[in-house]
Image (cartoon, helix red, strand yellow):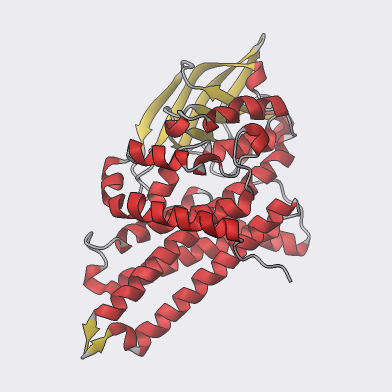
């Protein structure tokens, strides 16, 4: 029987991260959301703990602890506050693109700087989606035109974390439209290259602790050696998306657990009709269902991460964890607001923020409907392109 429970080493990391999340994220979540950023001192502490590159292999400067440990860490950070967890420094999802698509030299060149002592305020930004594109790669309008030893990039990218300010932007662009997916390339644009402009800062329903923008690329000149060329795009993107979705699902689990715990504690002290509201069957059953959904999502995430660490096919497990975690987070956060009643939608309590964050999470990395289709395709043996 496979045991997904944390090892002794992982439990020590969890305990450390839990303390950090409570003091540095939970207690400051309103300030961070209002300011749209995490304090520099918090970024420094996070980096000094080694968390910003925990799942980057050691040969590229990271801790190399794998996806399962990374998922455990992200759950704890998001238990503190998921918006702040997403705003912390590191290569982020851009790092997954480089790991999945880059050559050995490119992985070392672009990822090692994130492990340096002064890298606590370095950020990576993954730039795939466009306002009219969503998950349909064939609709991508951003282009890359070859000129001697450079590519010239033009276009716009939408819903970009740290867009325009990140230390590296991994930008997907069409090189040859006649080749379909094979004609798309991923380019690493390093900080200081002219031509990247923030066209607008996006104000979302939730997750506003992290800067999310729309950016324009205007004749951005990128050296040919910055075209990620270690793995064919279709194959590489499959692995990239699987890692992104596992981390996203782990964050949703952390949010759900935070909302559940808060609602449980409230139900023990709030009284109605002469006894705590948690002792009324309607609410106690609701809380029991919430706890079951959180635990189910957590085990699916651990299973998916374990498959990735073993190098085994993980597509089905990843999609199931993504769907369960997203749906659970929205349901549990919404129920937490309901349990708090009139107190649930005022900012004296964090549950209204978690409900907004959960709804935003359900859309920002793709929809659960899309992953449900992938689950059906997988169990039915139907091949599909990466999306």
Residue 88 image position (x, y, % from top left): 43, 42
- Residue at the extreme right of the image, as rendered: 381
- Residue at the extreme top of the image, as rendered: 148
Q: Is residue 23 left or right of residue 69?
A: left
Can residue 196 be seen from the camera position used here? yes
Going 68% across and 45% down the picture, which residue do you hit? 239
Q: Nearer the viewer, residue 154 or 272?
A: 272
Residue 267 image position (x, y, % from top left): 30, 78
Going 56% across and 62% down the picture, which residue do you hit? 323
Residue 386 image position (x, y, % from top left): 68, 46
Up the image or down, 209 lies above or below 288; here it is above
- Locate residue 264: give its quadrant: bottom left
Where the N terminus falls, by quadrant? bottom right
- Locate residue 121: give its quadrant: top left
Count of number-bearing discs: 0
Can residue 185 be seen from the camera position used here? no
Going 48% across and 27% down the picture, which residue do you hit? 167
Up the image or down, 167 lies above or below 41; here it is above
Going 78% across and 60% down the picture, which residue do you hit? 381
Q: Is residue 288 left or right of residue 308?
A: left
Up the image or down, 311 lies above or below 228; here it is below
Residue 360 image position (x, y, % from top left): 42, 53
Q: Nearer the viewer, residue 167 or 41?
A: 41
Q: Nearer the viewer, residue 174 or 340?
A: 340
């Amino acid at each position: 029987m496979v045991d997904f429970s944390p090892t002794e080493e992982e439990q020590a990391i969890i305990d450390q991260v839990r303390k950090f999340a409570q003091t540095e994220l939970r207690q400051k979540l309103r300030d961070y959301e209002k300011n749209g950023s995490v304090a520099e001192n918090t970024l420094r502490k996070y980096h000094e703990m080694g968390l910003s590159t925990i799942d980057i292999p050691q040969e590229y400067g990271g801790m190399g602890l794998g996806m399962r440990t990374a998922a455990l860490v992200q759950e704890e950070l998001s238990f503190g506050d998921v918006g702040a967890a997403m705003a912390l420094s590191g290569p982020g999802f851009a790092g997954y693109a480089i790991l999945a698509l880059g050559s050995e030299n490119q992985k070392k060149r672009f990822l090692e700087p994130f492990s340096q002592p002064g890298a606590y305020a370095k950020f990576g930004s993954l730039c795939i989606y466009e306002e009219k594109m969503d998950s349909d790669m064939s609709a991508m309008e951003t282009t890359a035109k070859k000129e001697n030893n450079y590519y010239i990039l033009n276009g716009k990218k939408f819903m970009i974390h740290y867009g325009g300010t990140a230390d590296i932007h991994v930008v997907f662009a069409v090189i040859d439209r006649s080749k379909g997916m094979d004609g798309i390339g991923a380019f690493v644009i390093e900080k200081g290259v002219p031509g990247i402009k923030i066209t607008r800062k996006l104000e979302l329903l939730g997750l506003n602790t992290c800067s999310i923008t729309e950016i324009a690329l205007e004749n951005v000149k990128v050296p040919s050696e910055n075209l990620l060329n270690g793995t064919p795009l279709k194959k590489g993107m499959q692995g990239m998306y699987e890692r992104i979705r596992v981390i996203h699902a782990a964050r949703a689990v952390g949010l759900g657990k935070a909302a559940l715990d808060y609602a449980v504690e409230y139900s023990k002290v709030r009284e109605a009709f002469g006894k705590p509201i948690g002792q009324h069957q309607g609410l106690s059953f609701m809380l029991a269902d919430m706890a079951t959904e959180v635990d189910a999502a957590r085990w699916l995430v651990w299973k998916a991460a374990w498959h990735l660490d073993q190098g085994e096919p993980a597509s089905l497990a990843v999609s199931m964890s993504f769907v369960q975690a997203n749906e659970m987070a929205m349901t549990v956060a919404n129920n937490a607001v309901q349990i708090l009643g009139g107190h649930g939608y005022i900012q004296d309590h964090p549950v209204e923020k978690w409900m907004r964050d959960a709804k935003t999470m359900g859309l920002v990395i793709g929809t659960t409907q899309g992953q449900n289709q992938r689950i059906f395709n997988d169990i039915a043996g139907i091949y599909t392109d990466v999306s």
